[in-house]
Image (cartoon, helix red, strand yellow):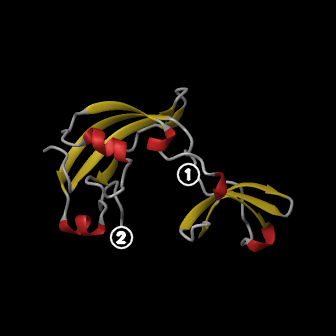
Amino acid sequence: MNITKNTAVTLQFKVTNAQGKLIEDGKEPSVYLHGGYGNTLPKIEEALDGQAPGYQVTLDLQAADAFGERDEALLRSLPKKQFPPGVKVGGQLEGHGEDGKMTVFNVMKIKGDTVLLDGNHPLAGKALRFAIKVLDVREASEKEITHQHVHGAHGHQH
């Protein structure tokens, strides 16, 4: 079966930065619903459209085509007293960005009574290389299409 809209695609992929430093080892397969649902990067979907199990490709994506450019407006510095006890560097918190949308903020630094947050994706601003192998392609279930993501092994669990 070939990859088309509303197919569940199982991939194995390795991600490195432009200098070749390993970011994701690709040992665990991942699965996504193909067809513009935002379950993987658009350039990856574009490269895989029409392909079959066994297909392999290496994609070099600039930051804009991967996780976007860094947006300095997503940096926040807030008083530590506004956070729950036990806030730690590396933790994640949800909050509203300047546009009012819910954003995940990463705790980057705690300096005295101040917490420094970053709402950018950790890989924003980075050119990345994706080495991808298609392991399996199957028709998505009606429920998966309705929910706009894959269920079950390596997919979303309800």
The answer to whether residue 133 is left or right of residue 65 is left
Q: Residues within 10 Å of mark 2 (few under 14, many from 20)?
A: few
The answer to whether residue 27 is left or right of residue 68 is left
Tag 2, which secondary structure? loop
Q: Residue furthest top?
A: 19
Q: Label 1 belongs to which residue?
A: 121
Give the percent coordinates (x, y) of residue 149. 31, 61
Would you place residue 125 above or below residue 80 in this image?
Answer: above
Q: For the residues labelled 1 and 2, say whether their Cβ atoms are less than 8 Å apart.
A: no
Tag 1, which secondary structure? loop
At x 25%, y 54%, the residue is 35
Give the percent coordinates (x, y) of residue 154. 34, 54
**151 and 3: which one is in front?**
3
- Three-letter residue code for mark 1: His
- What is the spatial separation of the Cα atoms under label 1 and label 2, in whole angstroms? 25 Å
| Residue 56 sits in quarter | top left
Residue 158: image tag: 2
**43 and 33: which one is in front?**
43
Q: Residue furthest right?
A: 112
Question: Of the residues tagged 1 and 2, which is closer to the observer?
Answer: 1
Give the percent coordinates (x, y) of residue 36. 29, 55
Residue 29: image tag: none
- Three-letter residue code for mark 2: His
Q: Residues within 10 Å of mark 1 (few under 14, many from 20)?
A: some
Q: Quadrant where the C terminus lies?
A: bottom left
Give the percent coordinates (x, y) of residue 11. 31, 43
Would you place residue 55 above or below residue 148 in this image?
Answer: above
At x 20%, y 38%, the residue is 53
Q: Residue furthest left?
A: 1
The answer to whether residue 35 is left or right of residue 27 is left
